Amino acid sequence: MTIHVRAVLRRQDFELNVEAALPLSGVTALFGRSGCGKTTLLRVIAGLERVRGAEVRFGPLLWQQGRHFVPLHKRRIGLVFQEHSLLPHLSVRGNLLYGYTRTSPERRRLHLDEAADLLGLAALLDRPVDRLSGGQRQRVALGRALLSSPDLLLLDEPLAALDTQTKREIMPFLSGLAATAGVPIIMVSHDPGDVERLADHVVFMREGRIDGIAPLRDALARPDSPLFVDDGVASVLEGTLGETNHLGLRPFGPDEARLWVPADHTNRAGQVRRLRILARDVSLALTDPAGISINNHLPVVIERIDRPRDGRVVVACRMTDGQLLLAEVTPWSVQTLGLRSGQRLFGLVKSVALMA
């Protein structure tokens, strides 16, 4: 299913001009620099921005076309903004139940105890909201939106106002939320890290227009992806975490593509998580080396070798579990190792970062 949006909006020195079908499976991120029109597009989808001549279709439902306009409260949308906008005179329980009690019983798909467990709020239900941390408030805002049993959840920079520690606190709850709650999510973000952690699809926006729409893996496979502007080319792998061993390491992924990551206390064994590996932290070897301090040696097959950029070459390698591992090497290495498409060799991963 998709949401089709067509809209032209002009304001002084800004113009939003879009026509696209956005995917509605998992999390779709609207990504681009501040001021590129992400939030304006989100407001058009929500019905908060009524644009003359616009058309918005949610699957088979027509939300706007010509004089036909379905207002926000009838679109069954949950909204979460940077500022949580909780009701200060109500407790956590009262805020969570605000949308729930205004939803007819036959439409309710999620109940208070389920939302509280999902977002780690069960012990906070009777606490006043002015005694919550920033991350807790944002989790309550998410819970309030989910308990209205929306057909679509819209998140406008939900992590932008949070400090690094608070982002770490809320990120595990956001990760996998669409799958757990069964609600598609469209999320606005200008932070590549948040997109890599949470998104399943990426809508690239620039100067009021959509440059492209791609699954996250395809977006990350491009060495010139806008997601790489800050930190450089990276791979984002998905896998299941195992138990911590006696050396303080945890297995990640299947046996044939096993990686070892440092132990942490925020992720349980059996959880599916994402791992971020910078391409510059991956070396290539023709044979599996012995007597080396790098723990992670993965058999791979070269899928493509990109053109040199700034004196570096990105080599895209397919792992045995089908995921793509990107390595960044010098043109000299490509020549001396005789690298070519279809070649079997080993990827040596020096450093990994488990995404919260």
Image (cartoon, rainbow, N blue to C red):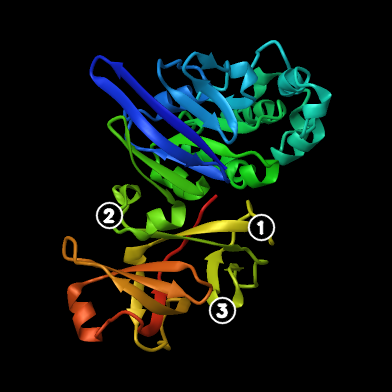
In the displayed structure, 248 sits above or below 187; it is below
Residue visible at 78% across and 29% down?
A: 108
Q: Nearer the viewer, residue 256 or 22?
A: 22
Of tags 1 and 2, the one toward the viewer is 2
- Left or right: residue 334 versus residue 284 is left
Residue drawn at x 46%, y 23% is 44
- 320 or 183, nearer to the observer: 183
* Quadrant in the rendering for residue 253: bottom right
Q: Which residue is mark 2?
A: 224
The foreground one among 34 and 246 is 34
Query: Which corner quadrant of the image does residue 123 belong to?
Result: top right
Quadrant of the image occupied by residue 91: top right
Left or right: residue 91 compared with residue 136? right
Badge 1 or badge 3: first in the primary sequence? 3
Q: Position of residue 204 (x, y in %)?
A: 36, 42
Q: Report which residue position mark 3 lands on.
A: 256
| Mark 1, residue position | 271
What is the number of the mark on residue 191? Answer: none
What is the three-letter code of the residue carrying label 3? Glu
Q: Percent x, y for residue 335?
A: 19, 82
Q: CA distance from mark 3 to mark 2?
A: 29 Å
* Spatial CA span between label 1 and label 2: 31 Å
Amino acid type of the residue tagged 2 in the rendering:
Asp
**Callout 2 crowding tier (Cα within 10 Å): few <14, some 14–19, many ≥20:** few
The residues tagged by marks 1 and 3 sit, at their Cα atoms, a distance apart of: 18 Å
Q: Earlier in the sequence, mark 1 or mark 2?
A: 2
Q: Describe the element under mark 3 as helix, strand or loop.
A: helix
Task: Name the residue located 68 percent from the left edge and 25 percent from the top edge.
Answer: 144
